[in-house]
């Protein structure tokens, strides 16, 4: 499975990734392959689970985009061991087959070019309203939106992200921790140096403490991320003054 993305990313094919899928975009066709991951709220570690997920995606999404979702196709391994869409041999995985839509017609592109009209938004809203009005609404369906179900999902989110929180630091905190860590800093020494650091901006965010005792959302600014071996800028975003660690001068020891 480790070679699948490389094998399917042939010349002329673009690869996009989500947390659960590899998406291969050709000139006219798109193939989405589920990653073999277990995220708690979904488990795609088995081939049959991924096949069923592909079939469910096509069934559900064809309701609003019947001309886009073409079906589920097998992924096979040839005599050379390379993965390919279709081909001879027994399926080793599965992909959702879609028609590629023009990127220029995407809502974000239209909005950026000031070409997204009120009539277009109204048309989409009316279609979705009709869809929701015709959707199944029984006791089982309603249970997924109950306070208890929402509470379970929220608690699950915290459980699944708890171990990742310590790997993220706001960029200015990272630079301070880097200085305290001394020469030849490691992920462990930087996190140790940051253990007692706090960050608070009056009117923006409450007190935040890293990496233990997490108490509030990540402060606004640019993020640096540790994967256990190296640090890099993970998410550039801004609420007030943005901190660009790419332009910071090297630290002298």
Image (tube, rainbow, N blue to C red):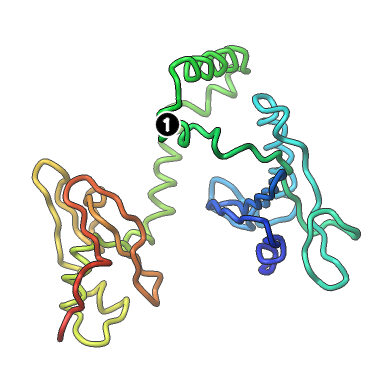
In the rendered structure, the answer to whether residue 160 lies left or right of residue 52 reads left
Q: Quadrant of residue 188?
A: bottom left
Q: Quadrant of residue 208?
A: bottom left
Q: Position of residue 90 (x, y in %)?
A: 88, 58
Q: Position of residue 116 (x, y in %)?
A: 45, 25
The residue indicated by pointer 1 is 111
Q: Residues within 10 Å of mark 1 (few under 14, many from 20)?
A: few
The structure residue drawn at horizontal position 67% and vertical position 61%, both measured from the top left corner, is: 9
Image quadrant where one finds the C terminus: bottom left
Residue placed most toward the observer, 245 or 147: 245
Query: How many numbered markers are drawn?
Result: 1
Q: Is residue 43 above or below residue 232?
A: above
Q: Quadrant of residue 182?
A: bottom left
Image quadrant where one finds the N terminus: bottom right
Secondary structure state at the residue bearing disc 1: helix
Q: Position of residue 179 (x, y in %)?
A: 16, 77
Residue placed most toward the observer, 122 or 208: 122
In the rendered structure, the answer to whether residue 25 lies left or right of residue 97 reads left
Residue placed most toward the observer, 128 or 136: 128
In the rendered structure, the answer to whether residue 209 lies left or right of residue 51 reads left
Q: Position of residue 87 (x, y in %)?
A: 87, 57
Spot the residue most to the left: 202
């Amino acid at each position: 499975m480790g070679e699948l993305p490389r094998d399917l990313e042939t010349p002329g094919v673009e690869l996009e990734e989500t947390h659960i899928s590899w998406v291969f975009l050709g000139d006219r066709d798109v193939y989405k392959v589920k990653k073999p991951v277990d995220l708690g709220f979904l488990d795609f570690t088995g081939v049959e689970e991924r096949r069923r997920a592909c079939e469910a995606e096509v069934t559900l999404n064809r309701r609003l985009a019947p001309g886009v979702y073409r079906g589920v196709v097998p992924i096979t391994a040839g005599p050379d061991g390379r993965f390919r869409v279709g081909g001879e041999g027994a399926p080793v995985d599965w992909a959702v087959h879609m028609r590629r839509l023009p990127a220029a017609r995407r809502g974000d592109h239209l909005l950026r070019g000031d070409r997204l009209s009120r009539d277009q938004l109204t048309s989409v809203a009316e279609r979705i309203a009709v869809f929701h009005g015709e959707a199944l609404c029984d006791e089982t369906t309603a249970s997924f939106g109950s306070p208890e179900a929402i509470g379970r999902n929220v608690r699950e989110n915290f459980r699944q992200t708890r171990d990742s929180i310590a790997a993220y630091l706001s960029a200015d905190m990272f630079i301070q921790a880097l200085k305290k860590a001394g020469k030849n800093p490691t992920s462990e020494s930087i996190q140790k140096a940051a253990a007692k650091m706090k960050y608070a901006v009056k009117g923006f965010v409450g007190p935040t403490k890293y990496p233990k005792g997490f108490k509030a959302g990540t402060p606004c600014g640019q993020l640096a991320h540790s994967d256990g071996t190296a640090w890099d800028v993970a998410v550039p975003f801004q609420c007030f003054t943005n901190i660009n660690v790419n332009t910071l001068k090297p630290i002298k020891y």
